[in-house]
Amino acid sequence: KMELITDESERPDVVAYSMTLNIIAEASTLSNHQAASLSEQIFHRCLEKGDDDAWVWNSYLHALSKCSLVDKSEKVLGEMIRLNIADSTSFNLVFHTLANNSQPNRAQTLLERMLNAKVQVTQGIYNACINAWAKEGEAVKAQELLETMVQRSGKGGPSPDHISFGTILNAWAKSRRRDAGQHAEALLIHMEKYGVDPNTTCYTAAINAWSSCSDRPMARKKSLELLGLMQDKCLNGDANACPNIATYTSVIHVVAMCRDQESAREAENLLQQMKEIEKSGGLQVNTIAYSSVIDAIVKSNVDDGHKRALNLLREMQTRAKDGKAFCAPNTITYNSVISAFTNKGEVGGARLLFNEMLRESSRGNEQIVPDTITYASLLHGYAKNKNPHSSRMALELLHMLEDKYTEGNKKLKPNNFVYTSAIASLANSSNPDAPLQAEGMLKRLQKEYEDGNTDVQPNSHMLGAVLRVWFASKEAQAPERASALLSWAEEKYNAGNNLALKSHRILYNQLLLIWAYSRRADALLHME
């Protein structure tokens, strides 16, 4: 409307155009495509009036940045440099566009260009570029830029801070490199030498970095040492280094990887330490902390691990009823305890916990609704159980899962592990039709896969489970049926219908065993 006014003094000026571009940039009701198109129209209408003030150009860059238009932003900056109107705001806008859109290499190139153009490069600019490298998993590149930053700080450049070091520590933690722990610990030492005291976030990131170490006992030792160092600093008055729940949980995670009795004891000791700190109001022992301890106990495979895990689950429930809802058990907690029971062959106890989840979730507790992992763990327990009724209960459980998924619960999508466990349970069945049921399930899933249902793709593990059912059946025709099944799988593989059905040595060994235990007079001939 302002543009239609004939009086030149009332027509929109640079301020009006700039404000409009900035409003478009921040408009949540516009898609990126709409915002980009509209801002380009307004920007060019302003240029047609002869207004090429840096303010308008920067407002246009702002809009392009919000639309994540990386190439366009660089092109506009290049034109501004040619017109000699680019300022520090222009460079900063384009830099953050690059850094925030997974372009660390181009962001660092622009950073160097800014330095050459005598544009002020702030601590925030360096940190944004370090973060861009870190998000791409390039811990080495991020640390190289930090070293450059340290060198330039002695020549008047900005100094690195906790964010600079902490970002790289997190990058090492997420890199999953075997030497990540060593790099992180060396960086902590570098921080202190440079005069930046590591804080809780930095120490916790270094502990997480040790989780990738292949030498698990050493990783446990190092994580406990770092925790001890934090505790000492905290006792000596350094409140910025006090361990928090995330720290303790990270240490427990590293400890759990050793999968031995010491891991279970150490995790329980750490839980006790957290409880003592909680009494003084220092932290809250929450669901994640308890679940981590339970996970460590389960992985340790100690004889009474399932009982100790269950005791902690009950403790969580008691505390939640006393008003501490932050430590109420959730689905992950129950899944860990169910896994502890099935690992010990206590499928009955696992089923009771599963029924408890069904009962409580039906009463409105949405935190413990069984998921696919719950069903898979219980099915795995039935597969390991030698009770002849376990196969019937496994199939009933599988049908329950399939029904819930068909009815619309997309969180309960059956997967390969679910079907493989259900098939494996049939090896314990006294039903003479069990091998045919197992083979029928495999071929039904293959047919569905060929028809376009890729939710489940039959593979060699599933095929092996069917062969084990034929082996357990001791049926007279088991060797021929097993041979035919392997031939069927080979045909599917060779035709390109399912490359996951590749036959291998283990499958042929199973076939040899079926022939060997058949006690048939012609068994040796077939085996040869």
Image: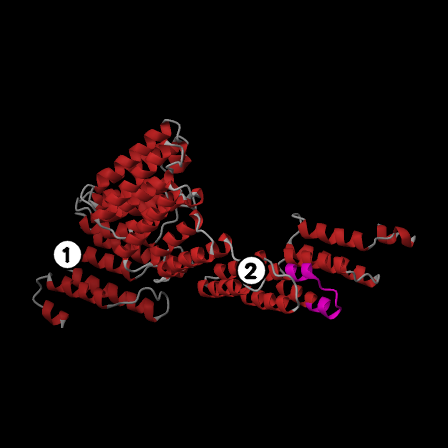
Main secondary structure of the magenta stretch: helix
* Marking on residue 475: 1
Q: Residues at badges 1 and 2 in contact (C-beta under 8 Å)? A: no
Left or right relative to 193: residue 502: left
* Marking on residue 126: 2
- What is the secondary structure assignment of the residue under circle 1? loop
Q: Is residue 269 above or below residue 42?
A: above
**Mark 2 residue crowding within 10 angstroms, few (<14) / some (14–19) / many (20+):** many
Q: Earlier in the sequence, mark 1 or mark 2?
A: 2
Foreground mark, 1 or 2, reads 2
**Mark 1 residue crowding within 10 angstroms, few (<14) / some (14–19) / many (20+):** some
Residue 33 appears in the rendering: yes
Relative depth, front residue between 278 and 354 = 278
* Residue 88 counted in the magenta span: yes
Q: Is residue 506 above or below residue 1?
A: below
Which of the 4 image quadrants contains residue 485?
bottom left
Residue 453 appears in the rendering: no
Q: Amino acid at mark 2?
A: Tyr
Q: CA distance from mark 1 to mark 2?
A: 71 Å
User: What's the colour scheme?
Assistant: secondary structure
Q: Quadrant of the C terminus?
A: bottom left
Left or right relative to 298: residue 26: right
